[in-house]
């Protein structure tokens, strides 16, 4: 197994901005790292640079401390687990797993091959399926056969490029947990590319968020969620997305288009010297004021708002509050949308409410917001000030 170090990696295709721009990441032996970001952020390019399918324009790539920039893919001993699994339909599971051994420079005896394939099959719980063809396997089993190939090769690391993107939602969920369990069981260093933030949050030890080739933040899923470094990460991670409210800074409160939000002095200190900030409030920081328990009440603030409409999802509800933006706020929202790579940001906030809440759309409602958890962002730099 291997540690992988990316040191100031750059990939420049033409004259435009680099597809990968000065990315440095230390991947520990056995770690599961996710590269995530919107389309075109450079995550596939970065993966292809690691595996050796793409030249490195500048910077260093180290595997177990050794520089491998100029090494051919097969000399790097990394295994790519492809989106379509790249299994041979006419071969049995046994022969599919044995395939890299039959291709290897060093010739293995039949007995050796049988031993290695059987062992991999046992680890992957495929023993009962060795004589089947891929067409007769479930998606999860196929994925395991693809991993079996990587295991018999004794690859130092597994690299996954959006392996689940063609599957329906239910299967994707199952496969996600299969991959996660298998990776932990095998303890193989893994790098996994996805544009899906749910996959990123549920699979990785650490998640690297990329935007336009630039690494924005690399952290545990929890840290990314609770302490995003900037507007982009804050908006990208979490569903429904964090709400961003333009807010005028007053000595003891924020003045927002949905009303004033009193904030503790230490929180407001973060905004010192600024007249306007963007308040970042996740939908679940709001609650139905009638349902907030006594112990929490003092840490937040109740206010009245009219929900334009609400959606009941069975286990929870989403409520929507629209606000009328001034020209200045409209401009802020436009800038924000550009920064977030979003088409537009509506003058609206989303709140998640308990399924038991009796609040409904079209009527004024008493809401409560946990003011301890409000983030403040600099509207110019996008940096999280809190
Ligand atoms: P997606 O999720 O859509 O695959 P991505 O985040 O994986 O996106 P990349 O495929 O790595 O993004 O592409 C990053 C940038 O590099 C994009 O702007 C893309 O157009 C550009 N790019 C990728 N491959 C090439 C190439 N062979 N020649 C020129 N430009 C390229």
Image: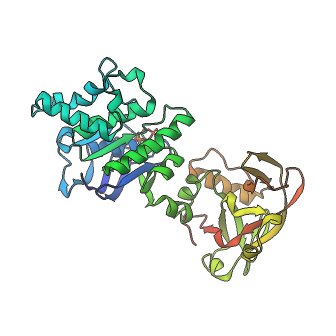
Asked if residue 132 lies left or right of residue 75, the reply is: right
Residue furthest out toward the right = 363
309 vs 59, nearest the viewer: 309
384 vs 337, nearest the viewer: 384
Asked if residue 307 lies left or right of residue 208, the reply is: right
The number of numbered badges drawn on the structure is 0
Give the answer, above or below, for where 301 lies relative to 214.
below
Q: Quadrant of ligand 1?
A: top left
Residue at 40% in and 32% down: 141
Q: Is residue 339 visible?
A: no
Residue at 73% in and 76% down: 295
Residue 217 drawn at (x, y percent): 45, 60
Residue at 56% in and 52% down: 236
61 vs 299, nearest the viewer: 299
When asked about the image quadrant of residue 281, the answer is: bottom right
Residue 148 drawn at (x, y percent): 30, 36
Q: Is residue 264 visible?
A: yes
Residue furthest out toward the top = 90
Residue 244 drawn at (x, y percent): 67, 59
Residue 313 drawn at (x, y percent): 73, 45
Give the answer, above or below, for where 322 lies relative to 256.
above
């Amino acid at each position: 197994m291997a540690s992988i170090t990316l040191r100031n990696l750059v990939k420049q295709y033409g004259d435009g901005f680099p597809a990968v721009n000065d990315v440095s990441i230390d991947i520990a032996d056995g770690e599961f790292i996710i590269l995530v970001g919107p389309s075109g952020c450079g995550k596939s390019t970065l993966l292809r640079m690691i595996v050796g399918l793409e030249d490195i324009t500048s910077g260093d790539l180290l595997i177990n401390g050794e520089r491998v920039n100029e090494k051919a893919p097969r000399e790097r001993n990394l295994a790519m687990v492809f989106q379509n699994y790249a299994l041979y339909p006419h071969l049995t599971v046994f022969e599919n797993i044995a395939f890299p051994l039959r291709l290897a420079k060093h010739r293995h005896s039949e007995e050796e091959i049988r031993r290695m394939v059987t062992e991999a099959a046992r680890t992957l719980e495929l023993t009962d399926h060795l004589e089947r063809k891929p067409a007769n396997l479930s998606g999860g089993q196929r994925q395991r056969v693809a991993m079996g190939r990587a295991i018999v090769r004794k690859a130092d690391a597994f690299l996954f490029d959006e392996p689940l993107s063609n599957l329906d939602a239910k299967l994707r969920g199952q496969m996600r947990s299969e991959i996660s369990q298998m990776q932990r069981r095998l303890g193989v260093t893994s790098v996994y590319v996805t544009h899906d933030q749910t996959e990123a949050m549920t699979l990785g030890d650490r998640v690297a968020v990329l935007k336009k080739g630039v690494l924005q933040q690399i952290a545990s899923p929890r840290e990314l969620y609770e302490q995003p470094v900037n507007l982009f990460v804050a908006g990208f991670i979490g569903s429904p997305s964090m709400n961003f409210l333009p807010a005028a800074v007053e000595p003891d409160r924020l003045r927002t288009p949905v009303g004033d939000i009193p904030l503790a002095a230490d929180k407001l200190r973060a905004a010192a010297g600024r007249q306007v900030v963007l308040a970042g409030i996740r939908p679940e920081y709001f609650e139905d004021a009638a349902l907030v328990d006594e112990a929490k009440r003092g840490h937040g603030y109740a206010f009245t708002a009219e929900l334009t409409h609400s959606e009941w999802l069975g286990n929870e509800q989403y409520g929507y509050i629209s606000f009328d933006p001034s020209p200045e706020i409209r401009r802020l929202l436009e800038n924000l949308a550009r920064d977030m790579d979003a088409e537009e940001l509506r003058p609206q906030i989303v709140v998640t409410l308990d399924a038991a809440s009796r609040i409904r759309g079209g009527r004024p409602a008493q809401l409560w917001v946990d003011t301890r958890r409000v983030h403040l962002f600099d509207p110019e730099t996008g940096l999280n000030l809190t």
